[in-house]
Image (tube, rainbow, N blue to C red):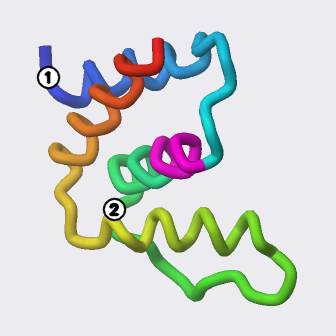
Amino acid sequence: MTDLSLFNESVAKSKTIGERPSNDVLLKLYALYKQVTEGDVQGSRPGGFDFKGAAKYEAWAKLKGISQDVAAKDYVVLVNSLV
């Protein structure tokens, strides 16, 4: 099975997580997902009072330069640790 098919299975599996993970874990899931599906962060950081948008941007920006394969593997591992 390819890393991307495992990743896609984990995306589906992530929707079945029983207890809501902490905000830090949710940000990590978001950032890894975006890194796999879109690559390095684009655009400028949200400002003003968009705290949620800024946190998501920062989490994703921390993964800059990480390959799609590595991000996919990390996503799979993280989801499996939560299910």
Q: Earlier in the sequence, mark 1 or mark 2?
A: 1
SS majority, magenta:
helix
Q: Residue at x 70, y 82 (%)?
A: 46
Q: Secondary structure at mark 2?
A: loop
> Residue, x 21% and y 62% (percent of image)?
66
Instruction: Say what secondary structure mark 1 lies in.
Output: loop
Report the residue at 32% width, 65% height from top. 63
| Amino acid type for the residue under numbered disc 1 | Thr
**Residue 80 lies in magenta, yes or no?**
no
Mark 2 sits on what residue?
A: 39
Position in image of residue 49 (x %, y %)? 86, 81
Instruction: Return the residue nearer the eye: 81 or 52.
Output: 81
Question: From mark 1 to mark 2, how far is it between C-alphas?
Answer: 18 Å
Q: Amino acid at mark 2?
A: Gly
**Residue 14's x, y, as percent?**
52, 21
- Residue drawn 68% across the image and 25% down it: 20
Q: Nearer the viewer, residue 25 or 16?
A: 25
Q: Place residue 50 in its image quadrant.
A: bottom right
Residue 19 falls left or right of residue 13:
right
User: Disc 1 marks which residue?
Assistant: 2
Number of numbered labels in the structure image: 2
* Stretch of the chain drawn in magenta: 24-30
Q: In the rendered view, would you say 7 is above or below 56? A: above
